[in-house]
Amino acid sequence: MAEQEKAGQKKAVVLVSGGLDSVTALAVAQDDGFECFALSVDYGQRHRSELDAAKRVSDAAGAPLKVLPLDLRAIGGSALTDDIDVPEDETTGIPVTYVPARNTIMLSLALAYAEVLGADDIFIGVNAVDYSGYPDCRPEFIDAYQSMARLATKAGVEGGAMTINTPLIDLTKAEIIQLGTTLGVDYSMTVSCYQADGAGRACGVCDSCRIRREGFSASGLADPTLYS
């Protein structure tokens, strides 16, 4: 019976970076009844410990993880992929930690993987409330990408409908943390810092650390982040 249920279970590809938002998106997808396949991208990011975190959270969730190599350092242009200092003060506008076209590229890889798996759903933990101002985290971008995905895929041509799920897009960071906690997420396994060290210890001063710390404070829950 269990095998029959799994055979009929809807599949989803979940982009898992190892950070707080992506692991919550994975938990939401599983809670919604999807058989989840985690996807991470080794794009040359300076905070390499996030890939270790992606493996930890995927293993804990029982979601097989595929890691794809993609050298965005060859393009550069971001503090995460180039020799540019990560800002340690609150910034305005689009910060230098924005990686050009990252979500476009990652969603394209997830789209290809979903087609191979026969999955009609992709989950991504983008957020348009408590975030760093990235243009590819906005609802307008997701809507446009979904329209493109439905035109560009074999499934779309044959009458299927690829759905880009963004369950966190309208939530505050505190609400995301509360949701994930309700779903049993262990945030001590995640790494959000833009310049975490090899052991996954957070710097505590970058924009991502600030947003994460303020989220835990506002949620009323203990912050399990390991700081350097």
Image: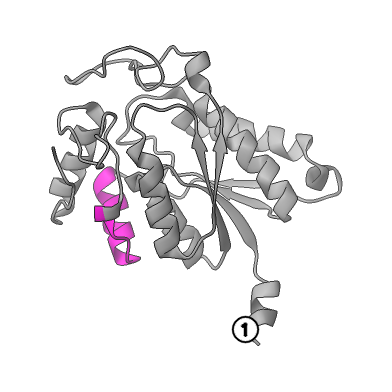
Front residue of 199 and 53: 199
Please state the extent of the stretch shown in magenta in the rendering. Answer: 173-188
Name the side, left or right, on which 50 lies relative to 220: right
The percent position of residue 39, horizontal first and vertical second, equals 54, 46
**Magenta span contains residue 220:** no
Q: Look at the picture and state if 204 lies above or below 60.
A: above
Can residue 18 be seen in the rendering of this structure? no
Which residue occupies the extreme right position in the image? 158
Can residue 65 be seen in the rendering of this structure? yes
Which residue occupies the extreme bottom position in the image? 1
Name the side, left or right, on which 77 lies relative to 204: right
Q: Residue at x 66, y 80 (%)?
A: 3
What predominant SS class does the magenta segment belong to?
Answer: helix
Quadrant of the frame with the C terminus: top left
Rendered image coloring scheme: one colour
Amino acid carrying label 1: it is: Ala
Q: Residue at x 60, y 56 (%)?
A: 12
The percent position of residue 211, horizontal first and vertical second, equals 22, 36
Where disc 1 sits, the SS reads helix
Q: Look at the picture and state if 77 lies above or below 99.
A: above
The percent position of residue 163, horizontal first and vertical second, equals 63, 47
Front residue of 209 and 176: 209
Q: Residue at x 77, y 34 (%)?
A: 152
